[in-house]
Image: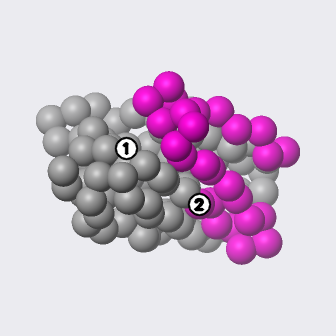
Amino acid sequence: QERLVESGGGLVRAGGSLTLSCSTSGSFFSLASMGWFRQAPGGQRELVAIISTGGSTRYADAVKGRFTISRDNAKKTVYLQMNRLTVEDTAVYYCNTGDLGGKPWGQGTQVTVSS
């Protein structure tokens, strides 16, 4: 069964850091680009960062230079290191495959940044 389980969110002050993890099950991980997405209250889900199977990365302009995506194929896990967080980063964060998300969405992990 293919599952995505996000963790690591929480409440942090502006300027702080968090590291999110997304563990997966199933056989797709090593064959797929993996992305982190977020959805703020009242907003649409947006792609934040993506990492290819070969390790190439791409970031949304809003997080470039502050967030770092990485992956561990042996653990079937993708990470998102988030530094210098701002209140605009407050959202539910999800992981999924590719740019649009090709697997059933997980429950996400809430990130709340206070001013």
Magenta stretch contains residue 41: no
In this picture, is 97 found above or below 45? Answer: below
Q: Which mark is residue 4?
A: none
Q: Tag 2, which secondary structure?
A: strand
Q: Residue at x 62, y 50 (%)?
A: 69
Q: Which mark is residue 79?
A: 2
Residue type, mark 1 in image = Arg
One can see residue 91 in this view? no
Q: Secondary structure at mark 1?
A: strand
- The percent coordinates of residue 45 (x first, y second) are 34, 36
Task: Identify which amino acid the numbered label 2 is placed on.
Answer: Tyr
Residue 39's image quarter?
top left
Magenta highlight range:
54-79
Q: Looking at the image, which residue sits at the far bottom?
A: 75
Residue at image x 69%, y 68%? 76
Q: Nearer the viewer, residue 112 or 37?
A: 112
Task: Count every numbered label the image shows and give the total.
Answer: 2
| Left or right relative to 87: residue 35 | right
Q: Which residue is mark 1?
A: 38
* Pointer 1 local density, CA inside 10 Å: few below 14, some 14–19, many at least 20: many
| Image coordinates for residue 25, horizontal then vertical, percent | 61, 70
Q: Residue 101 at what x, y percent from top left?
A: 51, 41
Report the colour scheme: one colour
**Picture quadrant of residue 40:** top left
Of the two numbered discs 2 and 1 on the same chain, state the one appearing first in sequence.
1
Q: Residue at x 44, y 43 (%)?
A: 37
> As displayed, is residue 33 above or below residue 81?
above
Q: In the rendered view, does 33 fall on the left or right side of 84? A: right
Q: In the drawing, does residue 59 fall left or right of residue 56?
A: left
